[in-house]
Amino acid sequence: MNIGVRNVQTPAELAAAEQFERLCASLPGGAAASAARSEAIARFAASGLPHRRLEDWKYTDLRTLLRELPEPATPSPAQVEPEVLGAIDAWRIVIVDGGAPVLPQELAAAGVTVRALSESLESQPELVSAWPAHSQTPILDLNTAFVRSGLVLDIPDGVILDRPVHLACVATVPAPAAIYLRNRIRVGKAASAIVVETYEGPDAIAYLVNTASRLSVADEGRLVWGKVQADGDAAVHLATAAADVGAGARLVCAPFTVGAAVSRNQIAVTFVGAQASADIAGVQLLGGRQHGDTTLFVDHALPGSASRELFKTVLDGRARGVFQGMILVRPVAQKTDGRMMSQALMLSDDAEMDNKPELEIYADDVQCGHGATAGRIDEDLLFYLRARGIPEVQAKALLIEAFVSEAIDVIGDDAICAALSEMAHAWVADRTPAGES
């Protein structure tokens, strides 16, 4: 006898349907974008929030972790200066509470096309409808359904930017609210740019950030894309990024996570041209009861591409870190060179790290490998430093900062690397007992 099991919807799932019914007519975009939003919320209603019985969400049961779905935030017209990377010399674009970005005219003078997402959806509904199938998740469906703000950045062929573009997303909400953002970044043929997204907000407020970034690097192009997540200590941060890398092009992808109570970064990279390369290096610094998940998918779809993935996680208190990484080598992708490593440094007996690196190879002439480690601070190195007169607390701090610096340095920009190193130093200092620094 078959017994039907009816899935009971959570308050967050029920809220999503109710909010969309009430708000859909006010969301930007024409008929095509509206249809894409309706399809997305229908898929979300059918699937619900992902949970631990799904392999990709085994370690991050969002159905349990996200019990409530706050109302979308009211866009703020206020102008605020970002704290995260606010001191670096960059073309800066600030989005406050999911409002409209203020676009710097200097970027247009540099040959870059930059527009607000809300102004582009009427003529480009594909900004919400087109997305790689392997990145489609209920989280992206929620983003598609509700997004109203973000950036469309187009760096034409041959344009080389000599300063980073800093997209600062700042939450100032006084109460729980949901902020949905989507960014489209395209680097043209033989063009080059550094683009860094930062996210920050107040502590003690359970706001939600759901952001999606679509990246394209055309043939012989170069994109350094950094993402710094420094949200408030009660926030939930959900992020999806998908990148296409053309022939002979190079992508550097560098997520840095230090904030939010719960975070999940989903990153997918696809080589759509031969002889392309990608360096993907991330850092997670988690303490208290923070939960941080990085889920990575690298698709070697054409011959001769190379990828390097390096992720460093430092865990303190009762924090939980998750790394899931998959390298897929398709049958045509001969001469692929792929390496993946996840390393965790455990500062507490109560912290937890879940590592799941995977390889799936269908070509025979490749070099691929993966690995994962988790352990405490090396006692021999600690003894070496203490033997040279360095106090134990300072010696541990030096070793922790050295541990993450290898991943930070991948971004390659001195000012950004220095700012991230300073954030890592501050994180370590916060854990230094008073009077022992």
Image (cartoon, rainbow, N blue to C red):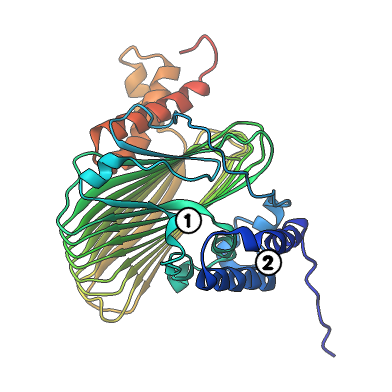
Q: Is residue 233 above or below residue 244?
A: above
Q: Is residue 158 above or below residue 202?
A: below
* Residue 25 tag number: none
Q: Is residue 66 left or right of residue 93?
A: right
Q: Residue at x 26, y 46 (%)?
A: 108
Q: Residue at x 43, y 18 (%)?
A: 392
In the picture, the quarter occupied by the N terminus is bottom right
In this rendering, the label closer to the viewer, 1 or 2: 1
Q: Is residue 436 above or below residue 414?
A: above
**Camera-side residue of 291 and 7:** 7
- Give the residue number, with chain letter if any, for mark 1: 118
**Camera-side residue of 388 and 341:** 341
Residue 87 rendering spot, x and y as whole percentages: 35, 26
Taking the image as drawn, is residue 51 in sight? no
Residue 25 rendering spot, x and y as whole percentages: 64, 63
The kind of secondary structure element at disc 1 is helix
Q: Looking at numbered disc 2 in the image, what kind of residue is underneath it?
A: Gly
- Give the residue number, with chain letter if any, for mark 2: 48
Q: Looking at numbered disc 1 in the image, what kind of residue is underneath it?
A: Ser
